[in-house]
Image (tube, helix red, strand yellow):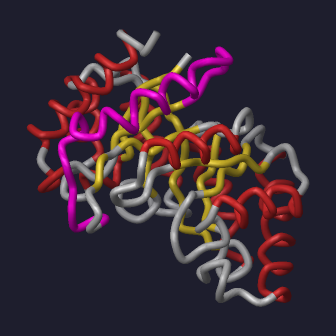
Amino acid sequence: MIVPGLVSVTFRQLGVPEVVRLTAAAGLAAIEWGGDVHVPAGDLAAAETARELTAAAGLSVAAYGSYYRAGHSDPAELDPVVRTAAALGAPLIRVWAGKLGSAEADPAQRACTVQALRRAAEAAAGHGIRIALEYHRNTLTDTLASATALFAEVDRAEVVPYWQPTGGQPGAVALTEVRALLPELVTAHVFSWGPGGGKDRLPLAERADLWRPVLAELAADGRDRFALVEFVPQDSPAIFLRDAATLRDWLTHPLG
């Protein structure tokens, strides 16, 4: 089952109660709470408040979206991240695979990231939480080859992939990436970008050629996964409501 939701950093300008209300109004079911504004690492009171408001609205917490960069962040930053995710009731902690792209990172830096991810997995597992890697440029998941190699190097079932498209990415390439990351892939960040990337945000419906096959692939094995709306044009709540409706329609009427 694909659970539709929102990445809270889509609306950094809104408070936690407003994000909850907007998500519920959009007919979505889950929120990935960001660690930069809404639920800062170490602020357990903020985490508990977000958890309570999310549950009261009939929504679930999809993940804690941290900005912990394995192999580069101070290792001391990991503990407050894990404790905050636990207070939030998050099943996943999103982290980043370093801060260098795979072409820039040398073997020692890559090995350091691998060891940091193993430590993060061990720390989170004590709370029943898994570590999810952001699929992103300027990290070791910036290409499919590097990402799949990294998961093999970490070799921990508790470390799992996210996925998101790049700007203007052909649908066939996106589908190849998603298939390679399955079945462990747990979450897709759902948005449409043109060739200009984040500066070229499109209505979600304009990339139906990419998203409809990807969503069908994510649903094919029947496992629970999240599809979370992010990066709406103009950071607009009104456009978000339209994009959320598009996502819900695709999930309700999947490709045959």
Q: Is residue 123 left or right of residue 249?
A: right
The residue under the point 34% across, 55% down is: 9
Magenta-drawn stretch contains 249? no
Q: Answer with left or right where residue 98 lies relative to residue 172.
A: right
- Residue 87 vertical position relative to residue 77 in the rendered view, above or below: above
Please say if 251 is above or below 75: above
Residue sitting at 22 percent across and 23 percent down? 245
Q: Quadrant of the N terminus?
A: top right
Q: Which residues make up the magenta segment?
A: 197-225
Q: Residue 239 at x, y = what percent?
A: 12, 40
Q: Give me the residue at 84% from left, 64% from top.
A: 119
How many numbered discs sit on the rendered protein?
Answer: 0
Reply above or below: 203 against 140. Answer: above
Please state if 129 lies on the left or on the right of 194 as rendered: right
> 20 or 216, which lies in front?
216
| Image coords of residue 139 (percent x, y) | 60, 73
Query: Residue at image x 48%, y 50%?
Result: 164
Choose top left, top right, bottom left or bottom right for residue 103. bottom right
Position of residue 146 measured from the top left corner of the image (x, y, whole percent): 72, 67
Q: Front-most of 59 and 5?
A: 5
Residue 14: percent from the left, percent from the top? 20, 51
Nearest the eye: 24 or 223: 223
